Amino acid sequence: MQNKLKNTVKSYLPILEWLPNYKKSDLQGDLSAGLTVGIMLIPQGMAYAMLAGLEPIHGLYAVTVPLLLYAIFGTSRQLAVGPVAMVSLLTAAGIASLNADSPEQYLLYALTLAFLVGLIQFVMGILRLGFVVNFLSHPVISGFTSAAAIIIGLSQIKHLFRIDLPNSEHVQEMAVAIFQNIGEIHWITFGIGVIGIIIIKYGKKIHKSFPAPLVAVVVGILLVWAFDLTAAGVKIVGSVPSGLPSISSPAFDWGTWKTLFPIALTISLVGFAESFAVAKTIQSKHKNYRLNSNQELIALGMANFGAAFFKGYPVTGGFSRTAVNNEAGAKTSLSSIISALLIVLTLLFFTNLFYNLPSAILAAVVLVAVSGLVDFKEPIHLWKKDKVDFWMLIATFVITLTLGIETGIISGMILSLIVVIYRASRPHMAQLGRVPGTNIYRNIDRFTDLDIRDDLMMVRIDGPIYFANVEFIKEKLDKWILDRPTKVNMIIFNMESVTNIDSTGAHELNEWINNWRKIGTDICMTSIKGPVRDVLNRWAILEYVGADHVFVDDNTAVSAFDHTIDTEILEKYTPYAIQSNLKK
């Protein structure tokens, strides 16, 4: 009993699993990874906060307490949690509809959004609803991510060029505004941004652990300070508050919650999908621990609660940071704790160093980060392999670009469900024929030279028989019967691939049997799975079919139809006789 309680506590607090067994040999990798990711988080956190419409300092707040909480509750030992470009843009898009009157009110909405995201993810984890994210199919995520990356990139043009652009998530509006204001480019700002992009983009070629974003930040600050570029019109971050974040509180009024809930649900699902995808990829390289999707939801929920009560905004696991964390040698979540401590030191002692940081450098950080999110290979691959998934990707991509982030992801989920329902409503069906010289039966459309009898039709349905597909199944069966040159005297239903039958399916199956027998076409069933047999028994269908018309395999059914098998042997090999012998 005590061991069971201990295991339960460990399942909800994974830190108790690895920390007591921490190896001294892991410290070097964790320390190196923690410092590397911490350095990376400083410019990224500030840049993403700006993308979300917040002051840069809130990006640093979002990687202190949330990072520590994930280290305690998360099952991944390499996942780096914090602000990401996608969630930052979704945050800005969601809060825009509330028309905040002041920066303080905007922050309150961001805190409330983080709280709602945390609440949704936490509840989903407790209710073990991690499977829900499966409704976001890979083509939908790919199309959505590529479109969102383009929108994010365009949203940073105003900082890179220093021109006035509307806060919009519709690509057509942004493109028109850029075209109209292109003549007002501030060339010094643009030059600083280009320098930043070059450093961040190509700095990694010097060495994989080269802190390119931080170097770009230092170069940008030095350029502004050395040449007094603020006097020339270069926009800088300005004063950055020092000290740790004070305790904050989200709004608890129903009106705000109701407005923010759709975007909170979107962030919850998209954030978890992104986080769990990268966590699975990294975990496959480490066999010393296992991921738990429901515990990951709880951990991300707790991290977002931390953001809500310590002046952050919604967070999730990031692709680039997690990859860097792993490559830098992270063995446990201690690396995340070290990263958080580095941010704490920055907040306490070094925020004044960021006064002259150009906004164009932060824009460069975002632009380079999202440039890799536009996936050109996936649509080409799907065009060759799966046209339905290709068009689903394209539809999600176009809708997201033109109608907005929230509409895009919701439309993508609906498209995924429609495709699932469509495919489920049209199960694969096959007529079977005997392989010459054997008792094996195969699909007559896939194999040649099979023995096919006109008076007997053997059918296999690959999937459940339920309300959504009964009409399709019946129409196909009727067509096959009509295509036969002579009357079909027997239909053999091979049920080995039928996984379930609902009430509609049972009712329709009973009707089919009744109508076929009225016109002189008998029916029998073979290879019925236990759970399906239970359903057929509940609806008295097996009783109606008859015990002498239910067989363990196709060959026995054919032999019974031809009267070429001894009655005693036939009775011995019915499912009922086998079941009775097993009970003995």
Image (spheres, rainbow, N blue to C red):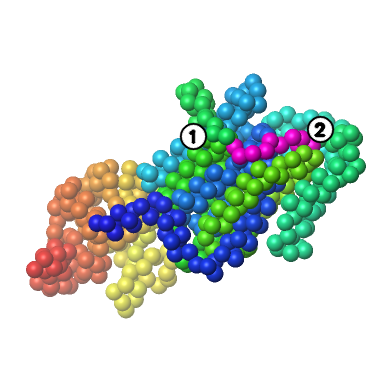
Q: Residue at x 62, y 32 (%)?
A: 93
Please tell me which residue is depicted at 34% across the width and 64% down the height of the picture: 432
Q: Which mark is residue 292?
A: none
Most extreme residue toward the bottom is 437
Q: Which residue is mark 1?
A: 116
Which numbered disc, 2 or 1, marks the residue closer to the eye? 1
Residue 322 seen in render: no
Q: Which residues are magenta?
A: 236-245
| Label 2 sits on residue | 163
**Is 242 in the magenta?**
yes
Q: Is residue 346 visible?
A: yes
- Callout 1: few (<14), some (14-19), or many (20+) C-alpha neighbours within 10 Å? many
Q: Main secondary structure of the magenta part?
A: loop
The kind of residue on which mark 1 rests is: Leu
Give the image quarter of residue 201: bottom right
For this view, does 367 lie left or right of residue 432?
Answer: right
SS category of the residue bearing label 2: loop
Closer to us: 572 or 421: 421
Q: Is residue 495 above or below residue 465?
A: below
| Residue 554 falls within the magenta-colored stretch | no
Image location (x, y in percent) of residue 117: 50, 37
Hey, what amino acid is under mark 2? Answer: Ile
Q: Is residue 357 left or right of residue 185?
A: left
Q: Position of residue 487 (x, y in %)?
A: 28, 57
Residue ID at (33%, 43%): 467
Quarter of the picture containing the N terminus is bottom left
Residue 157 percent coordinates (x, y): 77, 38
